[in-house]
Image (cartoon, grey):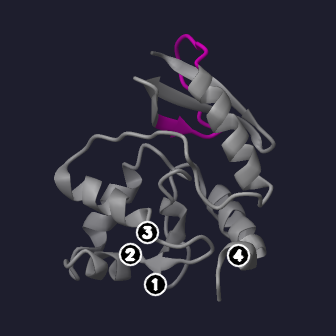
Amino acid sequence: MPWGKVPTVWGVFYAWEEGGAIVALRFPNQEPGGPLQESPVFGVLAAELSAYFQGGIEGFSVPVRWEGPPFFRQVWEELRRIPYGETVTYGELAAQLGRPKAARAVGQALAHNPLPILVPCHRVVARGGLGGFGPGLAWKERLLALEATHKTKFSPR
């Protein structure tokens, strides 16, 4: 199925759906080329993203699926374990994966994350700053600020 529009309170995102699962997400500044279609899963994703952007939820129930090299998939799975409102460095994430010298490889996996926000690569930062973010650092800053604002709702600390 081609891309579909996902209207949210933060703008129109775009998603690719296959077999009822979201397999790719793009930000408003990353319009896909080609035809757009509709799918019920796009409505679920739109509602969940809007709730997240308003500080109403910390995670997503919309089905997702990703493909990639085994190490990338391992990194993406580990991203889902980073708590809402928390950050880790590329090096810390590499160490958590049992590969403490693989910080650059972790960065490559994050750069190829097809599901930003849903698989929260924005929670990984450089030791001395923000690091990178495909949709742009302004988006990363906005997402981190959102989670910092609402963290106490979802964190037992």
Please identify, in this view, whether the residue under mark 3 or under mark 2 is nearer the observer: 3
Q: CA distance from mark 4 to mark 2?
A: 21 Å
Tell me the kind of residue under disc 2.
Answer: Tyr
Q: Residue at x 27, y 55 (%)?
A: 72
Q: Residue at x 44, y 62 (%)?
A: 80
Q: Could you tell me if the residues under marks 1 and 2 are in contact, i.e. CB atoms within 8 Å?
A: yes
**Is residue 3 placed above or below 91 in the rendered structure?**
above
How crowded pointer 4 is (Cα within 10 Å; few <14, some 14-19, many 20+) is rated as: some
4 or 1: tag closer to the N-terminus? 1
- Of marks 1 and 2, which one's residue comes earlier in the chain? 2
**Front tag of 4 and 2:** 4
- Mark 3 sits on what residue? 81
- Name the magenta segment's main secondary structure: loop
Residue 134 vertical position relative to residue 78 in the rendered view, above or below: above
Query: Residue 98 placed where, x, y %?
Result: 20, 79
Q: Which residue is mark 4?
A: 151
Real-space CA distance between mark 1 and mark 3, rounded to the nearest whole angstrom: 19 Å
Mark 4 → mark 1, Cα distance in angstroms: 22 Å
Q: Amino acid at mark 1?
A: Arg
Q: CA distance from mark 3 to mark 2?
A: 14 Å
Q: What residue is pinned by disc 1?
A: 127
| Residue 53 horizontal/vertical position (percent) | 75, 53
- The residue closer to the viewer here, 4 or 39, is 39
Q: Is residue 122 left or right of residue 7?
A: left
Q: Secondary structure at mark 4?
A: helix
Instruction: Please report the bounds of the magenta region as a residue range.
Output: 24-39
Q: Quadrant of residue 79?
A: bottom left
In this view of the protein, can residue 31 be seen by the observer? no
Q: Is residue 25 magenta?
A: yes
Q: Secondary structure at mark 2?
A: helix
